[in-house]
Amino acid sequence: MDAWVPFFQTLLWILLIVGVLWKFHAQAVALLGAIKIRIEKGSSVKAGPFELGQDLRPQEPEQQKKRLDDEVKQAQLEEAKPSSTQAHLIAKPSDSDFRSRILIAEELALRALQSEFDVVINRQVKMGSALGLDGAFVKDNRGFGVEVKYSRKDLSETQLRHVVSQFMNYAKLKNWKQFAMILAVVYDGPETELHTQQEILDSTLSEFQGFVQWRLYSLSQLSQKYGLGLPANI
């Protein structure tokens, strides 16, 4: 008789499961329907206790174009200002030149960050209806938003603070306790000025430690690392 005990236990479990499914059939169908609707609307980016929320979506082409337009305008404004590197810049770049170098800088910086953090970065995403990010990923139960900035001259402390504050305020609004920002600056000026740009970054963003991590890359060094030939700096 003892040999039949496992059989009867298994049979009872099967009958119990069948009974529960039969009794709560309507609720189960409704639950599956709700899950299906949530997936169709856009599910959350979640890992462990961290969740970015359902409003994390790919940027529309129009938003990507607008962000690039804004980057070009900002670069042109910085180009017009005097700086310690002005003597090295012998001609004013065209809009097309700026766009090409900004896009190349963004792509190479994201590749470098992917290798450093050993993750796949979701490119060109938006939070809510307006706030755009160059990238986002989850690592060790923490969310990271990535913003890439292109620079040819001395970094603007005001602009750096504005970028970080914008994302920090959004994270506070959403009550994201496990969210951090990575600000990657790609410098397209003389490599002899890299140390000066690093000092500007360190001194400007030290007040945001704990929320933002920052990286400084040389565009020429990145292009060599990934085997990309760049036209001569303008």
Image (cartoon, rainbow, N blue to C red):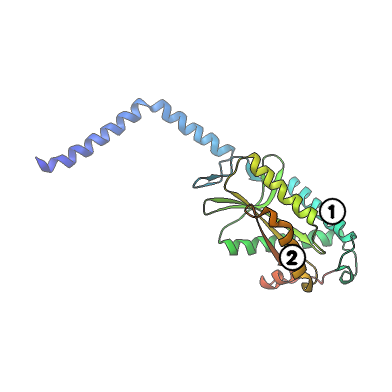
Left-right relation of 6 to 167:
left
Looking at the image, is mark 2 or mark 1 earlier in the sequence?
A: 1
Above or below, 157 against 11 in this view is below
Mark 1 — residue? 73
Q: Is residue 60 visible?
A: no
Residue 77 at what x, y percent from top left?
A: 87, 56
Give coordinates of residue 49: x percent, y percent: 50, 45
Q: Residue at x 10, y 42 (%)?
A: 2
Check the picture and name the quadrant holding the N terminus: top left
Question: Which residue type does callout 2 highlight?
Answer: Glu
- Position in image of residue 102 (x %, y %): 77, 60
Secondary structure category for the residue under label 2: helix
Q: How many marks?
A: 2
Q: Secondary structure at mark 1?
A: helix
Marking on residue 199 = 2
Which residue is located at x 67 percent, y 47 percent? Answer: 168
Residues at discs 2 and 1 in contact (Cβ within 8 Å): no
